Amino acid sequence: KRIFFWSTIFGCSVLIPVYTSGLRNQSGFYRYTMRNLKKGQTRLWAPMIFVYIFSALVLRSLDNEGRAYLKWRREFLSGIAMEAHDYQSRCSVLLERLPPYLRTEGTLKKYFEYLVGVENVHS
């Protein structure tokens, strides 16, 4: 979510003006693309810098997510007791288009207890 937010902000505020100020005078959609830039223009550095910044942002985000996953995985494998609300938020599911006979909380809970066991249902 954050990755695409920042790339959109940078693309709209930096790259589009760089492309539209190109010297090839393209028309239509091509006016807003790299095709509007001439070969050898210094403006061609902007997309390359964007690629490096975007790649660094993606790698940082992947690193953060990986560290969070490893922390949760270690907690799970070590048997450290998690808070009930913490555990439930990690294992929650969204159910849609339930058959009419499972649309009450009690019947749905009984059904899941039947499927995965009473100890695995936290609601």
Image (spheres, rainbow, N blue to C red):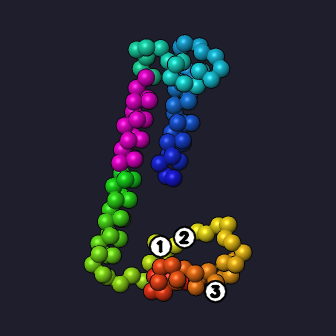
Q: Are marks 2 and 1 in contact (CB under 8 Å)?
A: yes
Q: Look at 52% across and 83% down and name the residue there.
A: 113
Marks 3, 2: nearer the viewer: 3
Give the crowd class for mark 2: few <14, some 14-19, many >=20 residues within 10 Å.
Answer: few
Q: Which mark is residue 106?
A: 3
Which residue in the rendered view is the most extreme toward the right?
Answer: 100
Give the crowd class for mark 1: few <14, some 14-19, many >=20 residues within 10 Å.
Answer: few
Which residue in the rendered view is the most extreme toward the left?
Answer: 78
| Mark 1, residue position | 91
Q: Is residue 119 left or right of residue 13?
A: left
Marks 3, 1: nearer the viewer: 3
Q: Is residue 122 visible?
A: no
Q: Nearer the viewer, residue 25 or 70?
A: 70
Between the residue at mark 3 and the residue at mark 1, the CA separation in whole angstroms equals 19 Å
Inspect the magenta stretch and tell me whether residue 86 lies in it: no
| Mark 2, residue position | 93
Q: Which residues are magenta?
A: 44-59
Q: Look at 54% across and 42% down and name the residue there.
A: 9
Q: Locate residue 77, reporting x and y percent.
A: 29, 75
SS label for mark 1 = loop
Q: Return the disc, 3 or 2, that comes first in the chain's sequence.
A: 2
Q: Locate residue 73, reporting x and y percent.
A: 32, 70
Q: Is residue 64 visible?
A: yes
Quarter where residue 17 is shown: top right
